[in-house]
Image (cartoon, grey):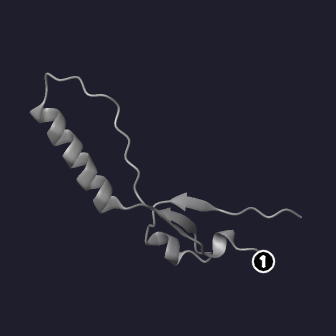
Amino acid sequence: MKKLGIISFEDHDMFRLCPTSISCVSLPLSEISAKLMETMLSLLENRNEVKSFQKSILKTELIIRDSSLSK
């Protein structure tokens, strides 16, 4: 018999309340927000300049809970 594991993005409080707590990838929301504002302000200040693609890598955390553990 194969078992199915569940994992989600973002660590929502609801995931801790379920009978089987849900594993997730916790996102750094404050860092995402800060990077977004930095990028948007830069674009607004330099409206006439063409910007190239920018890539940002932020650290996430994998939180293992009951939904993905072997039974």
| Residue furthest right as drawn | 1
Mark 1 highlights which residue? 71
Q: Residue at x 89, y 64 (%)?
A: 1
**Residue 35 screen position, x and y as percent:** 27, 50
**Residue 48 relative to residue 19: left or right:** left
Image point (58%, 69%), residue name: 22
Q: Is residue 66 left or right of residue 9?
A: right
Q: Position of residue 8 (x, y in %)?
A: 55, 59
Tell me where residue 52 appears, x and y as whole percent. Answer: 31, 28
**Helix, strand or loop status at disc 1:** loop
Please tell me whether residue 12 is drawn above or below residue 56 in the rendered image: below
Quadrant position of the C terminus in the picture: bottom right
Type of the residue with mark 1: Lys
Horizontal placement of 17 versus 59: left or right? right
Q: Quadrant of residue 42 in the image? A: top left
Rendered residue at 24%/54% (across/down): 34
